[in-house]
Every structure is written in C-alpha cells, then in structure tokens.
Image: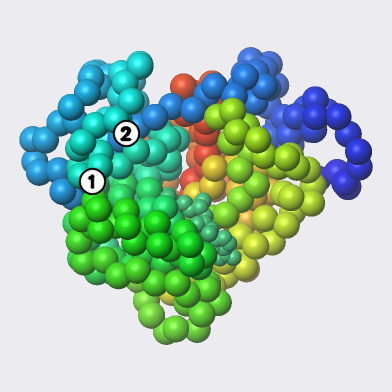
Amino acid sequence: MHAEDPITPARAEQRLCERLQLHGEPAESLLRAMRAGNAGRQAVVLSPRALQGYEPPFACEVGTAFPWLPARVRIPAAGEIPTRHADYAAGLYYVLDLSSCWEGAALSALPQEPQRSLDMCAAPGGKSMLLAAQVALHDHTANEVNAARRGILRQNAELCGLPNTRITGLRPDQWGKSGELFDLILVDAPCSGQSLLCKGMKNPGCLGASMVQGNAKRQRGILLAAVRCVAPGGHLLYTTCTYDVEENERVMAYITRRVRGFKACEIPSLTPYRTWLADFPAYRLLPHHGAGAGGFCCLLRREN
Ligand SMILES: C[S@@+](CC[C@H](N)C(=O)[O-])C[C@H]1O[C@@H](n2cnc3c(N)ncnc32)[C@H](O)[C@@H]1O
C-alpha cells in the first residue's frame, strides 16, 4: 500500500487496480462499475420455511448462467421487487446481493454436513441463510458483537425459521478462549466494503491506506481467534465484500503462515474465479463477471 496522502478519487481507483494487477477490460470494467454504481444484483434465498417445491410469487430468471448458484437461490427477473410480496414478510425467502450467494457457493466444497457450525459475524443473517439453504443445520450458532445488529439478526432468524440456532454476542477473542469447537466457522468479516461503491452506495475513504490496513488488522485478529475454534478436520470460510488484496489474499496468507495445520481448499465450482494474486486456492468476484458487485472467498481446512 502507498502511505496515506491526498490523492484524487481517480488516482485512488487506479491504485486499487494496480494492487489487483488488473489491466485492460477487467480494470476498465471495475472503474466503470465504481463510478456508475449499478453493478448490484438481487437474489433471493429460499428460507427453511419454504417447503420443497415452493417457488417465489414473482418471475425469476431461468437457465441461469451461473453453474455455482446454490439450488435454493433464485435471481428475480428484471423489474421484480421481491420485498413487495407477502411471502417476504412471512419469511419464505431472504433477499441479498447475488455476490453474497457467490461467496456462499463455496460451501459446496464441504466434504460433509457440519454437525456444529458458527457464523461469527452473522448480522443481518445472509450467510446463515445461505448455509441453511445448502445443508441441514444441526447445531448452529449465529453470533454478532453489535447489539443493535444482533436484534435484527434474531428477528431474521426467527422470521425465516432457522432451525437449531442460538444467537450469541461474544467477541472473537472470547470465542477463542471458550474451548468450543465447530466443524464449520463462517467469518464474513467487517471490511472496507469497496464493492459498495459498485452498488451506488457512498463509502468515503474505502480505497485509502488507513481504512484498508485498519480492516486488515481487525480481520487478522478475528481470524486468529476463530481458528482456535475449528475442530480437527473442520473448515473455516473467510469472505469479504471488498476487493483489496491486503484484506483478502494477504490476510489468508498471514493466517496459513502463522497458524499450523490450516490449508486453503480448492472450490471446484468457483475455478473460473480463482485469484491470480495467491499461490493457494482463493477466489475473487469482480463486477465484469455479472454476478453482482463482487467479493472474495477462501475456504480453509484444519488438518486432522
Ligand atoms: C459483513 S458484516 C456480516 C454480514 C452477514 N454475515 C450477512 O451475511 O448478513 C460484518 C459483521 O461483523 C461485525 N463486526 C464488526 N466488528 C467486528 C469484530 N471486531 N469482531 C467480530 N465482528 C465484528 C459487524 O457488526 C457486522 O455485523
């Protein structure tokens, strides 16, 4: 990263592309998307309340272009507003960005259903919904440190009928000392949120060195605690909604170097998105992929 200095927004965007080693059309496309703010794309995930055979009461895309799309996720057709329908208020589906579903698709690489799972940064609940859409929840903990956000998480979990789920509010360091072990831990980390720009949201400073480095430090701290709670043979899925290599590949490289016994796993369904900035399997979605504003995911496995 460059030291913090007063640079124009255009220069900050260019520097991001340089850090990502993006050139040509992918770089142009990222810059266009950040300026236009129209790369967001809605998706709905059918909740545990939606019984087998249920379909949402609005038109959805058929024959999706995304082979990784989890079976219980639908992409509303252009112009549809899923939140308008009574089924939404009844918790039959949950609305999120398609890039979150892309991150959740990494769960397809799990070799078996986790018996105990922890969503460490869970509010408002999107990743827990995606987990419930792909595996049966046997003993799930949805954790959120922020009390106000925890309230929203609880409402969403109840509304959508997440089964066998407890809601908690421990800090990562408290989890690290708890002695509890899980087969799967989701760390959907707080981040600089650079992809929010591509959804037309304001996020001042998100391309700057201090914001990126501050988030990377917090992410390393969360992960160092989280890895202590992964059972032998268990998995940790790390995801962010930001592009920066500092908060993604470098954080994963730091953890796998610092903590013995953790290895990044291949996610076969996401092979076309494999990052070019790491020598281990990790995956980056960018706006030009057409599946929403973008994100990053890396699945770690703890050896037995
Ligand atoms: C990206 S959001 C999670 C989104 C959620 N997983 C979903 O899919 O709906 C990150 C969450 O981490 C929480 N958070 C912020 N700082 C944290 C910290 N130091 N440790 C753990 N969680 C933190 C935030 O309150 C926020 O709810």
Quadrant in which residue 200 is drawn:
top right
Looking at the rendered structure, the secondary structure element under dot 1 is: loop
State which tag comes first along the sequence, 1 or 2.
2
Say which residue appears at 43% left-offset and 56% top-offset: 123
Question: Which residue occupies the foreground of this view, 109 or 135?
Answer: 135
Read off the residue under disc 1.
Answer: 91
Is residue 123 depicted above or below 171 in this figure?
above
> Residue furthest toward the right?
5
**Label 1, label 2: how far apart the Cα atoms are:** 10 Å
As rendered, which of 274 and 61 lies closer to the eye?
Answer: 61
Task: Give the class, few, some or many, for how many residues have Cα within 10 Å of label 2's Cα (few <14, many ≥20).
Answer: few
Residue 111 percent across, percent down from the top left: 27, 54
Front position in the image: 80 or 213: 80
Q: Amino acid at mark 2?
A: Thr
User: Are dots 1 and 2 in contact, CB under 8 Å?
Assistant: no
Residue at the (11%, 35%) spot, across then down: 54
Instruction: Look at the numbered disc 2 and give the secondary structure of its residue.
Output: helix
Q: Residue at x 48, y 62 (%)?
A: 148
Side (left or right) of 94 relative to 7: left
Q: Quadrant of the N terminus?
A: top right
Q: Position of residue 50 (x, y in %)?
A: 14, 43
Q: Which mark is residue 248?
A: none
